[in-house]
Image (cartoon, rainbow, N blue to C red):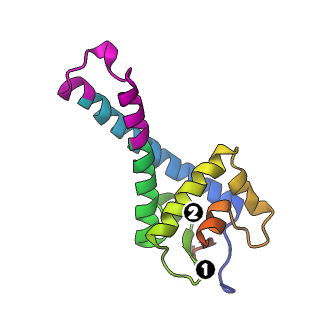
Amino acid sequence: MANVVSAGVGRRLGAMAYDGVIVLALWLLITIIHLAFFRLILSQPVEAVGASALAVWSLRGLLLLSTTGFFCFFWRRAGMTLGMQAWGLRVQTLDGETITHKQGLIRCMVAWLSLAVFGLGYWWILFDRQQRSWPDIASQTHTVLVPDH
């Protein structure tokens, strides 16, 4: 780990913004399909679509699962999401290997917590000597700069 450079706050925020746009598009697509299912397949009247607890919680669950799936898929596949690729970042194990499924899930769970406390888990990078965020620490991973980017 001595020859890698930790990713700073600026690049991480850039990658998060880029990935946020992609996730937003994914959420819109899932929401459209979800609403169409309730309206066209279940034949709910227009005014009832999205009004039931089942509709609300199933959509929330789908959005949570799709977001987690998006990040875990890309982290496990290449160590980077599309936003991370654009900003020259990679998440890896402390040994420089591709993260495991378990580490990806831990990263996602802690990322939601980090965001819920006004991003404190990501601003933690400014205080940690190794520039690790809470998701990095909890999953025993490290977000680094990709060489020659």
Q: Residue at x 75, y 59 (%)?
A: 124
Report whether residue 105 is seen: yes
Is residue 115 rendered magenta in the image? no
Image quadrant where one finds the C terminus:
bottom right
What kind of residue is marked 1? Leu
Question: Which badge, 2 or 1, comes first in the chain's sequence?
Answer: 2
Q: Which mark is residue 94?
A: 1
Q: Say the numbered circle drawn on residue 84.
A: none
Query: Which residue is rendered at x = 50% and y = 52% of the image?
Result: 19
The magenta span reads 38-61
Residue 15 in view here: no
Q: 45 or 85: which is nearer to us?
A: 45
| Residue 130: quarter of image | bottom right
Q: Residue 70 appears at what percent x and percent y?
A: 42, 56
Q: At 60% from the left edge and 56% from the top edge, which residue is drawn?
A: 110
Which SS class for mark 2? loop
Image height of 98 relative to 20, above or below: below
Pointer 2 with pointer 1, Cβ within 8 A = no
Classed neighbour count for the residue bearing mark 1: other residues with Cα under 10 Å, few (<14), some (14–19), many (≥20) = some
Q: Residue at x 44, y 68 (%)?
A: 101
- Callout in the foreground (2, 1): 1
Q: Which residue is mark 2?
A: 87
Above or below, comparing residue 141 to residue 62 in the picture: below
Q: How many other residues sit within 10 Å of disc 2, few (<14), some (14-19) or many (≥20)?
A: many
